[in-house]
Image (tube, grey):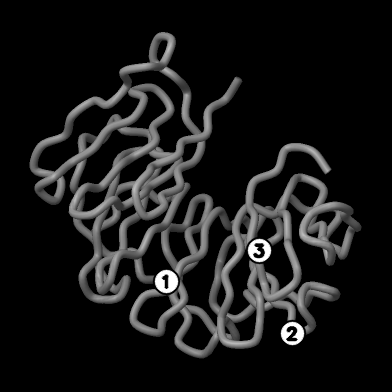
Amino acid sequence: SSNGYAFIRYGRYFLLGSMAGVDRSTDLGLTWGSVGLTTLGVRSFLIHQDTILAAGDGGVFVSADSGATWTRTDTQGITVGYSFSLAMVGGMILDGSNGAGVFRSTDGGLHWSRTSAGLTNSIICALLVDGPTAYAGTTGGMFRSTDSGLSWGGISPANYYTRGLAVFGARLFAATMYHGVRYTDDGGANWYAANAGFIGTPTLNAFGASADRVFVGTYG
C-alpha cells in the first residue's frame, strides 16, 4: 500500500493503515498482505484489551482476531463517518472525528457519546494522552482535557493547524501545517518554534517520541 497513515504492533503482527485499508505482516515486516477495509482510508489504530480498533474514512472498526477481519463499531452514537484519531484516557476511548469533534466510549467502542464541550474547532486531526490529560490537535489550534475527554479548553493560537502531537518530559510538541514544530513548557501559556535544521518552514504530518528523542514526519 501507499500513503501510509498509521502503524501498530500487536503481538507478532504488524499492522499498517493506509488509503488502501489495512495491511498486516506476520514476519516482522518482511512481507505484507491486505486484511480488509480496502475501500477506506485507515488513519489510526488503538489496542484495547484483546481487540484492535481502527479509525478512518469509514468510521471506527474493531477486530478481535489480530486484524484478520473487521466490524464497524461506531454506529451507536457517532454522527459522522470520518475519524482521524483514537486514544485512551482513564479507561475511556476517544475518537477524533472530521467535523463533529470528539466522541467517547466507555464500553470498548460499542457505544459512543459526543464530548466536545469547549472545542471551537470540530476537525480533530490528532489525539494524545499523557497520564490523566488528553490533548486534541485541530485545524484551528490545540485543546486540553483534564476530565477524560468530557470538556476541553484551548491552549494554543487558533492558527496552529495541528497534525501531530508528542510529549517529551514536561514539554508538549505540536506538528503544524504552516508553522513547523512548536512546543510549550508551561501548558500552552507560551509557545516557541523549534525548526532549526529544516529547509524553510516544513509542512508537518506526524510526531513520535522515544525515551530520549523526538521524531517528526513531513510532506516531501
Furthest residue in direction front, as rendered: 212
User: Are circles 2 and 1 on residues that touch, CB within 8 Å?
Assistant: no
**Residue tagged 3:** 59
Quarter residue 7 falls in = bottom right
Where 117 sits versus 68, above or below? above
Left or right relative to 58: residue 189: left
* Closer to viewer: mark 2 or mark 1: 2
Residue 88 position in % (x across, y down) = 43, 73
Q: Earlier in the sequence, mark 2 or mark 3?
A: 3
> Under tag 2, what secondary structure?
loop
Q: Callout 2: few (<14), some (14-19), or many (20+) C-alpha neighbours within 10 Å?
A: some
Q: Callout 1: few (<14), some (14-19), or many (20+) C-alpha neighbours within 10 Å?
A: some
User: Are circles 2 and 3 on residues that touch, CB within 8 Å?
Assistant: no
Residue appearing at x 38%, y 58% in the figure: 128
User: Are circles 1 and 3 on residues that touch, CB within 8 Å?
Assistant: no
Where 182 sits versus 96, above or below? above
**Residue tagged 1:** 114
> Under tag 1, what secondary structure?
strand
Q: Earlier in the sequence, mark 2 or mark 1?
A: 2
> Under tag 3, what secondary structure?
strand
Q: CA distance from mark 2 to mark 3?
A: 17 Å
Q: CA distance from mark 1 to mark 3?
A: 14 Å
